[in-house]
Amino acid sequence: MSNALPATPAKVPLRPATGIHSKPPTLRHERSFKAQGVRYLAGVDEVGRGALAGPVSVGIAVVDLETQKSLPGVRDSKLLNPAERERLEPLVRKWSLASAVGHASAAEIDALGIIAALRLAGTRAWFEVLAAGVTPDLVLLDGSHNWLSPAEQPSLFDEMTVDGSNLRCDAPVHTRIKADMQCLSVAAASVIAKVERDQQMCGLHAEYPDFGWNENKGYATPFHRDVLRAAGPTPYHRVSWNLLGGEL
């Protein structure tokens, strides 16, 4: 079998993302927590969970439920094309009371597993928010599983400070399926996480241009797997994963 790398795919013109005309997310669900005394709410979402290469990234966008207004145009990042996300990212940062993106590398994913790596990335973002002087009262997390809160007993997988104490998100976490589609704070978090991770993948593309990470961002496209088959994994691949989808 030839070990020649496949030809780089031709660039495809950007198309509007599907679902762009769906009902826009609002702060309605977030404001339902005001009755519980919540004022500062952190919307949280992740990107890169299913990729073969690169980090998993977690975005946080904090809103003030007493004063926050809507931000037109923001959707779940999957419903926006790259140009729209790039345009909205600085607007989201300015709109948010505080915002941050945390990352866990492919090596950390291999060492810890994806759930612990998500928690690590989310904790890094959480403490960046705290360092900005904002302490959220509650976290609204996309999905049905709370991967952000650590187990009661700290493990070796929890990030440590220089003095040996464990870092952890200790705010209450509320999960909601499709929060990225319905809740503006979570959609905003998805936008900043996606833009920052995409920028990282474009930087890694400069080191390994054959894999097309500037286009596929590390996800399992047929072209990406063709190059993996021919050239093998890089240090940025999640080598503990089944990278070739069951092939020998």
Image: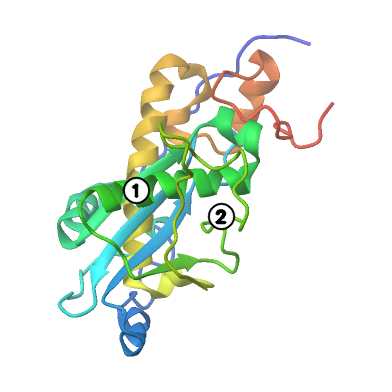
**Is residue 58 found left or right of 218 in the rendered image?**
left
Element on which disc 2 rests: loop
Q: Residue at x 46, y 65 (%)?
A: 141
The disc placed on residue 127 is 1
Q: Amino acid at mark 2?
A: Pro
The disc placed on residue 16 is none
Q: Amino acid at mark 1?
A: Phe
The disc placed on residue 150 is 2
Q: Nearer the viewer, residue 235 or 82?
A: 235
Q: From what the image shows, is residue 20 above or below residue 125?
A: below
**Is residue 53 found left or right of 43 in the rendered image?**
right
x and y percent of residue 248 in the render?
84, 26
Q: Residue at x 56, y 55 (%)?
A: 150
Corner quadrant of residue 243? top right
Q: CA distance from mark 2 to mark 1?
A: 14 Å
Callout 1 crowding tier (Cα within 10 Å): few <14, some 14–19, many ≥20:
some
x and y percent of residue 24 in the render?
33, 75
